Image (tube, helix red, strand yellow):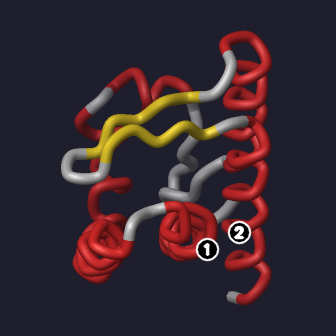
Amino acid sequence: MVSIEQFSAGALKFIEIEMLPALKVSQRWVVGALLGVAQWRIPEIIRELPVKYPLIAALGLFDAAGNIDLDAARGAVKIACQKHGAAEFSVPLIGTFSLSETNFDALYESIMAEAKMK
């Protein structure tokens, strides 16, 4: 289990290290600025997920204290990647990102590194 703050910090670090370098300079600037704002909102958005979406609550990925079962999430994502390939996300102003099983593993490691630091 990791806290929402650890999850957020690790995810932001992953984006900075793994995703930003693949962008054009102008896109990096936009995403960098958005990340500066997002770092304060991401924990709040994640906390709202099980409240707004009963299916997410039913999956049991959050404990009573609001911590995230990262290992369960990772297992589900790995299975999905193995069955269906990389996940594609369309991001306004940026384009389409494709995240493979390897990318999700790097995201997991980034989050776990944050969890170990705090």
- Picture coordinates of residue 4 (x, y %)? 50, 65
All told, the count of numbered labels is: 2
In front of the other: 92 or 35: 92
Q: Quadrant of residue 50?
A: top left
Q: Secondary structure at mark 2?
A: helix
Query: Quick one: label 2, few (<14), some, or many (20+) residues within 10 Å?
Result: many
| Image height of 33 relative to 59, above or below | below
For image coordinates 67% across by 47% down, the residue present is 69
| Image height of 4 relative to 59, above or below | below
Q: Amino acid at mark 2?
A: Ser
| Image height of 116 relative to 26, above or below | below
Q: Amino acid at mark 1?
A: Ile
From the viewer's perspective, is 89 left or right of 81?
left
Q: Secondary structure at mark 1?
A: helix
In front of the other: 102 or 113: 102
| Image height of 67 relative to 36, above or below | above
In the image, farthest residue toward the bottom: 117
- Picture coordinates of residue 63 (x, y %)? 57, 49
In front of the other: 110 or 3: 110
- Picture coordinates of residue 71 (x, y %)? 77, 45
| Mark toward the viewer: 2 or 1 | 1
Query: Earlier along the polypeptide chain: callout 2 or callout 1?
Result: 1
- Picture coordinates of residue 76 (x, y %)? 70, 27
Quadrant where the C terminus lies? bottom right
The residue pinned by badge 1 equals 17
Q: Quadrant of residue 6?
A: bottom right
Q: Which mark is residue 110?
A: 2
For image coordinates 79% across by 81% down, the residue present is 116
> CB of mark 2 within 8 Å of CB of mark 1?
yes
Quadrant where the N terminus lies? bottom right
For image coordinates 28% across by 64% down, the residue present is 44
